[in-house]
Image (cartoon, rainbow, N blue to C red):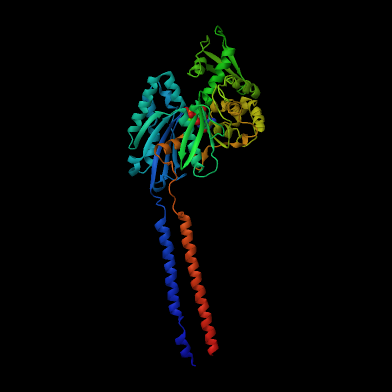
Amino acid sequence: MDEQGVKVKNPWHRPVVIFLAAVIIVGIIIMVAISVVQNKPLHQKYKYGIVLDAGSSHTSVFIYEWPAEKENNTGMVRQKHTCNVQGKGISSYSANPQGAGASLQECMEEAKQKIPAHRHPETPVYLGATAGMRLLRMENEEASDKVLDSVAHSLKSYPFSYQGARIISGQEEGAFGWITVNYLSKNLRKPTGTLGALDLGGASTQITFVPQQNIESYDNSIDFRLYGNDYHLYTHSFLCYGKDQALKLSMGKKLESTLKADETDPIELRDPCFHPGYNFTRTVPNVFNTPCMKEMKLANETFFHVGLGNWSQCQQSIRKVFNTINCPYSRCSFNGVFQPSVYGDFGAFSAFFFVMDFLNLTSDTLATTKQKLAAYCSTPWKKIVENHPNIKEKYLSEYCFSATYILTLLEDGYKFTSNNWKDIRFIKKIGDSDAGWTLGYMLNLTNMIPAEAPDTPLMPYGGYVTFMFLFSLLILVLLLLVYFYFRRSTRTGQKDII
Ligand SMILES: Nc1nc2c(ncn2[C@@H]2O[C@H](COP(=O)(O)OP(=O)(O)OP(=O)(O)O)[C@@H](O)[C@H]2O)c(=O)[nH]1
Ligand SMILES: [Ca+2]
């Protein structure tokens, strides 16, 4: 047979094959491109929320953002921006309530810049005040109402959706801190354990965790149903046991035992919680100007606060602020408050972190922590100042007291031991969001954590794209294999004929 006859029989004519292959490849590219583009999350569409944390020592403004179509998924809300309000907390404006509202202006203007204008009207803004305002309300309810009115008036003047300014309860503060850390750690939709929350503020401190034992007091129990799981939480907030109020309590006790009411000479308060060589003149009313203590009338208006730098004596003096005598339950932390045994891992944030991080004590054993702290406390004040020229002296002078207070609170108060000390993680942030009550508060008020788990798509977006890609690749490989197979068999046929 001649060559022409063979050519006519060959169905795999080159141009046709190239054309077909090109069409298939282009088809596959289009298919993958469409699947990517069509299913891409619309990440331009973000929603926003603003929460003001009006703490006892200062106010912070938190701006959160989340993809509009994924608001019910855990871990989707993230902190976009924070702004620290200049000056002290809003409770310090009791004598000048208008000043409280005015103090928020700078940070609220910043919020206007950070959030796209077309989202302003739908962006909720909440203000929650904590222990500083709880104390002011105890002292002077009219003044605390005026301060709240002032901040409410100020917040309403912005183009956001004002949702209220109120004093949150200690239970809320503890529970929302727990929700925040577990939401950010993505613990809430998994069967794994949860993270307890330890928050140390200036005026109060909170402990919240899922206990193994029964909760014997109604006030300390709080229930949540989140993403289809039930959580039975233990929580307690100790008013007056934030680190600033605890310092006053501790100094007040020392003053009471040192000073006599008829004393007229300038007197010295020799304090083991401050560095040797530290000497500062303080006024007596400045220690007792808190509803956390009974006022003490003293002849002296001022006293010399003199440091001794003795860690173990400091701990002895701090123990006196915890009352461990009366416990009407099977077990207590202190001051007659029920507490089950601490259980599981804990995230310890705010001042727990600031203090332990500054002293490099976030990852030591309890014994090493104590040794290092003892050495730090006995370091002369002059040397401490030399070593840290850029830190405010007020903060710097208090680290020995604060860290000793933290150890005593955790060990003697909450009953952590050297065995479970490693379960405490000193943290500031999880991902890029701060640990604190504000995120949990917003998630709760915007119903962003549903009680039941939302339906999930059959396949996640990433899995879908990968599947489409691999499947297309498989088709291409098969086509190529078929092509080469036929080409070979055609050639073999030609040879046979020749
Ligand atoms: N060393 C140090 N201390 C800080 C820092 N920020 C805040 N503090 C102090 O740490 C303590 C606790 O601060 P926060 O957690 O902000 O307390 P708060 O929210 O104002 O107080 P509460 O209303 O009791 O929660 C206060 O005594 C603050 O003065 C910091 O960056 N470094
Ligand atoms: Ca706080």
Q: Toward the viewer: 172 or 380?
A: 172
Q: Toward the viewer: 147 or 301?
A: 147
Horizontally, residue 306 falls left or right of residue 58, namely right
Q: Against 269, is 13 above or below?
A: below
* Point 37% across, 32% down: residue: 105
Q: Position of residue 118 (x, y in %)?
A: 33, 44
Q: Quadrant of the C terminus?
A: bottom right
Q: Is residue 139 visible?
A: yes
* Point 43% across, 70% down: residue: 24
Residue 212 found in image quarter = top right
Q: Is residue 278 visible?
A: no
Q: Against 260, is 489 above or below?
A: below
Residue 102 found in image quarter = top left
- Furthest toward the top, the residue is 262
Q: Position of residue 397 (x, y in %)?
A: 57, 25
Q: Toward the viewer: 159 or 487?
A: 487
Q: Against 300, is 127 above or below?
A: below
Q: Against 84, is 37 above or below?
A: below
Q: Position of residue 422 (x, y in %)?
A: 62, 36
